[in-house]
Amino acid sequence: MSSQGLSPDGLTILNWTIRMGPLDALLHILNFVAPALGVGLFASLLAKLLWRKELRAASLKTLVVWTAAVGMLVLAAGLVAFGRDGRMATYGLLVLSTTLVLWWKGFVRPQR
């Protein structure tokens, strides 16, 4: 018998069987993207508060959407690169990418 594969009981990896229903899968996905959403929202709010005059042209919604989307891509890339979620290097890249997106959308290419 193979140590990996999909059986009727669930996904088996190294003799561990993972049983996950639709709600469990949804909660796992939401918990995976939560850091990107939280950091994106918090950083965008803080940037709009600190640089109110300079970021007048950029809407809060635009900043949050862009920072969260790029953050989710960084988290997915970290999962692929490191083979697991939650590595400190991934979170460091999340913070760096969020600041770069805010700088780009707010100062380099502001909306007109």
Image: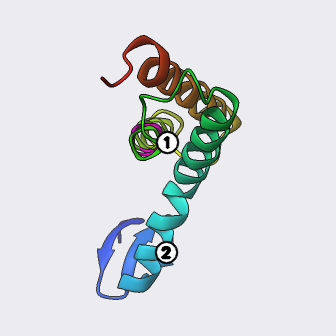
Which quarter of the rendering shows the C terminus?
A: top left
Disc 2 is placed on an element classified as: helix
Residues at marks 2 and 1, CA–CA distance in whole angstroms? 16 Å
Nearer to us in this view, 94 or 99: 99
Residue 27 - label:
2
From the viewer's perspective, is residue 74 above or below residue 85?
Answer: above
Is residue 20 on the magenta stretch? no
The residue depicted at 55 percent of the width and 64 percent of the height is 31
The kind of residue on which mark 2 rests is Leu
Tell me, yes or no, if residue 19 can be seen here.
no
- On the image, the x and y values in percent for residue 61 come to 42, 47
Q: Which colour scheme is used?
A: rainbow
- On the image, the x and y values in percent for residue 13 come to 45, 65
Residue extending farthest top? 108
Nearer to us in this view, 100 or 19: 100
Is mark 2 in CB contact (under 8 Å) with mark 1?
no
- Judged by its main secondary structure, the magenta piece is helix
Give the mark, 2 or 1, whose residue is nearer the N terminus: 2
Q: Quadrant of residue 89?
A: top right
Please give left or right for residue 81 compared with residue 34 in the image: left
Which range is magenta? 64-68
